[in-house]
Amino acid sequence: MSEIKQNGTLLLLGVNHTTAPIDVRERLAIPISRLADATRTLAHQPGVREALILSTCNRVELLTVQDAPAIATSPPLGMMSFLHDYLNLPAADIQPHVYEFREREAIRHLFRVASSLDSMVVGEPQILGQVKQSWNVAREVGAVSSMLDPLLQRAFSVAKRVRTETQIGSSSVSIASVAAELARKIFGSLAGKTVLIVGAGKMSDLAARHLIQQGATTLLVSNRTEASAEKIADSLRTPAITTGVIPFEQLHEQSHRADIVITSTGAGQIFMPEHARALLHRRRNRPVFFIDIAVPRDVAPEINKLEGCFVYDMDDLQQVAARNQAVRSREAEAAEVIVSKEVARYSDRLSQAPAIEAFKQLQLSAEAVRQQELARTAQRLAAQPLTPEQQAAIEALTRSLTAKLLHSQLEALRVASPGSGEETSDSNGK
Amino acid sequence: MSLLWLRVAVLLYGIAALAVLPAALYNRPRWRHVAMPAALAGAFFHFVSITETLYAAHRALPVDTHETLSMLALLLAAAFLLLAAKYRTVAFGIFLLPVVVLLTIVPAFRPGHETLAYPAIRTGWLLLHVALLLAAYAALFLSLIASLLYLIQERRLKQKRANPRRTWLPPLETTDQIALKALLFGLPCMTAGLLIGSVVALQTIGPTFFADPKVLLSLAMWVAYMLMIFIRQHSGLRGRRAVYLSSFVFLVVLAVWSANALSVVHRFKAP
């Protein structure tokens, strides 16, 4: 870690969903429109050499490279004053929620965040994009350079490795995304599929939005109160989405138009096996997926026994979500191992950097001396120039001499370098 | 030399058949990177082997059972590669590749020595007859596998035990499309193959050919095939009943294949 110290100290300060309640996070959050300005301001704080700000709904983190005197206090006053001055928040309000990581632990934290191991929903894919966005903003304002730039690039490749080598993000863990995932298992692509929402409810609305995100293009709504149905249809209508309202009394006559039916009325069994049979007949046995998120259930469970009908109620969806969550937890353990290895590798590379630089300098200066001496000798022998064979022999001789003279010094440098076995960790993370 | 290439192909198919198991069942991309190149290389060596055999024998069509099986295997391997490229699924390999290995292993280690019963009919039409019928058989087998995969996925979804780590099965609609498309591809192949065969037989042997059990069974096979497509198209038959129907037609195809033994005129003859 001596490289970090030479170029400044890596310091990460932040709050996240585990350390701060939502009202604190809300006050600290920096919208994307202000991110460039905030990053520039942070980078201009006294003692700050490089800076990056990550602001999402679940975390606000300041990653900086600072001069040693600037970080004498914990947390560093400069960073706290940035939070206080820029966001107009009293330090006392923030300080209890702030965590701080330095050097190796800061690297570990960044790798974990980018790999979605520190997210509220472990394995969610958005965080990597958010880190990349922060990095782009910091690059645009010139706030990252020799230290943070390679570190961030390494964080992205670690995140990619975690995604590729584990199945941390392979399955959905929210009810709405589980429903969308199941729909994909039935229909493959949801492009061109029709979703019917029966009843008005937040959950059905959310599930419908997920299905639309996955490519469903037609949305039908049916509700006892037609005005509510129209309101939902209007709220989900976009140029790419066709919406329509089915009068509740015509529900059974028209429900065959839908590939996916989301019910949330809670009014008892609206869909009985005979309705499902008629529906299948009209669809010429094309599969239909019932997502019943009502309690009591709207869809008779016996319908699931009919060929071509798939019924998932709230309990079923929750069970799938729980199973997926368990899978993610197992995969997270494997991901942590990858992150630990990558942190060690990156730290080793950093700690060996000064030795490598010294090797290079030593070799360059030795080469310069050799060239000088060769030129001087050539000048002395100008009257009787050497033959090409003699020149080659002298070239080889001087090279060999330089290499042998340098060998013991280079070996001593290699042994003394921190990456050669000495304990290099100097983390102070809390 | 052609036998050597065929043995190399068997080895590569074997590797692909094994590698496809973890690739599909446990969703391990590394194994997929073994299975796909191995299957592709296997198909290449297989093709080289068949071409070399036919070239060396100065003929354009397989004349014995082993060669015919080997050609069918090549078609199935090609079908697997095509599906993997188009639908990004290796699930079909679980069933297709072992069959490919089995169909290739016998000709690779015990080549046949039969010749054509009527050497005079070594025409391009006969080659087309054989190739089209083999394509139809391969399409039917593929359709059967697709229907089976549909059934497995349907059961998993109905029993609500879809393991998120085992997402090897293609979506229901995809398998259904594959099953139907395979049948729709197979129908013209079978129709044209049988028609060409009939015309060639009529010219070579005469009307007595049509009283042959092999020919009668072939006609029954074509009717069953047509009926299956009609039922699937018009009633949207899927799942369990589609598997039963496909299995029935497949049994008819096997019967037609075996009828070579009973046939007087449509058979390969030992030298």
Image: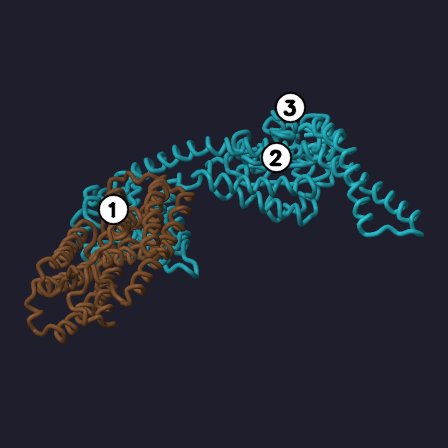
Chain colours: A cyan, B brown
Residue type, mark 1 in image? Glu
What's the residue at 65%, 26% (across, down)? Answer: A424
Chain under callout 3: A
Question: Hey, what amino acid is under mark 3?
Answer: Glu
Q: Which mark is residue B100?
A: none
The residue lying at 59 percent from left, 45 percent from top is: A31
**Which residue is drawn at the image coordinates 18% and 49% (left, top)?**
B240
Find disc 1 in the rendering and name its residue.
B154
Identified by mark 2, the residue type is: Tyr
Query: Within 10 angstroms of label 2, few (less than 14), some, or many (20 or more) residues?
Result: some
Report, in whole angstroms, how far the alpha carbon at label 2 lies from the one at label 1.
47 Å
Taking depth in this image into account, of A126 and B36 the one nearest to the observer is B36
SS for dot 3: loop
| Residue position marked by numbered label 2 in the rendering | A346
| Secondary structure under the numbered disc 1 in the rendered image | helix
Mark 1 crowdedness (10 Å alpha carbons): few <14, some 14-19, many ≥20: many
Q: Circle 3 sits on which residue? A: A423
